[in-house]
Amino acid sequence: MDIYEKDAHSKGYHAVAGVDEAGRGPLAGPVVAAAVILPFPPPVDIGFKDSKALSPKSRDKLVKEVFRTARAVGIGIVWPEEIDLINIHKATLRAMERAVATLAVCPDILLVDGTFPINSDLEQRPIISGDALSVSIAAASIVAKTTRDSIMASYHHSFPEYDFASNKGYGTRDHMDAIDEHGPTPIHRKTFRGVMKDLFSGLKGKSDG
C-alpha cells in the first residue's frame, strides 16, 4: 500500500498528497474530495484502505486516525447546483483541486485516484484504483466518504421522506419512489437520469393540464 509513496520519496518528493473523491454517482447531494499528506514512512499498520471496503463503523474509527497521523488534510466540495452547471466529471476534478488548495502543507507531488489528472501545476500521478493501491489515497477516500456521509445525514433531517441517512443520495428503489411521489428536492442533481425523468413528467403534466 505504500509503494507509490516510497517511489515518490526516492525521487526527492517529501510531501506526497493522496487525493480521492466520494459521490460521483448519487442523484442528490455534493461530490466531496479529500487530500491527505501522511508522514514518511506512511503508517501502513493502522489499516487505511479503500473506504468502499470498510464498514461505516470502521470508517468512523479510521477517519480519526487519519486526522491524528496526517501532516495535513484538505477537503473540497462541489454542490449540486454547480454539478448541474459543469457536469459531474468536471465537478469531481474541481472538488479534488479545492481539496488540494486547502492543505495547510504544500504538497510537492499528488497521487490522484483515477484516470485523469487535475488542474494543477504540481507534479502528479493518476492511479487507477489508487484507493486500493496507495495508503495516502486510501486515507483521502476515508475522509471524503465520511465527510459526504455526514452531509447527507444532515440533509435527512430536512428531507426525511427521501431517507438520505440510509441511501446517501444514491438511486435506491425507495429513493426513486420518493422522487416519483414528492419530486426532486433542492439538493437533487437536476441533470441526472432519474431526476430528469421526474422533472420532464412534471412539465408534461402541467402542459397537459
Image: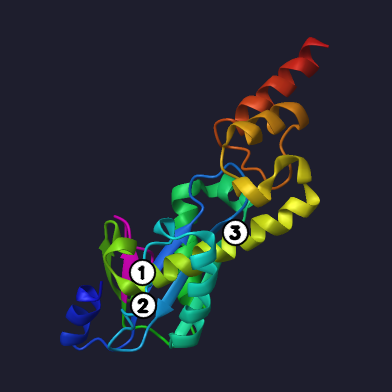
- Establish if 63 lies above or below 198: below
Find residue 202 and report its image quarter. Answer: top right
**Which mark is first along the chain, 1 or 3?**
1
- Horizontally, residue 112 falls left or right of residue 158, namely left
Instruction: Label 1: state its secondary structure.
Output: helix
Please give the count of numbered marks on the rendered protein. Answer: 3
- Horizontally, residue 85 falls left or right of residue 202, namely left
Mark 2, mark 1: which one is toward the viewer? 1
Find residue 139 and report its image quarter. Answer: bottom left
Specify whether residue 114 is painted magenta.
yes
**Which mark is first along the chain, 3 or 2?**
2
Three-letter code for the amino acid on which mark 3 is drawn: Asp
Residue in view at x 55 percent, y 69 percent: 60
For the residue carrying disc 2, how many other residues have a C-alpha within 10 Å: few (<14), some (14-19), or many (20+)? many
Indicate the position of residue 164 as horizontal and vertical percent values. 67, 48
Residue in view at x 33 percent, y 86 percent: 15
Instruction: Label 3: state its secondary structure.
Output: helix
Q: Which residues are magenta?
A: 110-119
Determine the CA span between mark 3 and mark 1.
18 Å
Label 1: which residue?
137
Label 3: which residue?
149
Determine the CA span between mark 2 and mark 1.
8 Å
Residue in view at x 72 percent, y 16 percent: 204
128 or 204: which is nearer to us?
128
Q: Is residue 9 visible?
A: yes
Indicate the position of residue 152 as horizontal and vertical percent values. 65, 55
Indicate the position of residue 140 as horizontal and vertical percent values. 43, 70
Determine the CA span between mark 2 and mark 3.
22 Å
- Horizontally, residue 9 falls left or right of residue 169, namely left
Instruction: Label 2: state its secondary structure.
Output: strand
Label 2: which residue?
17
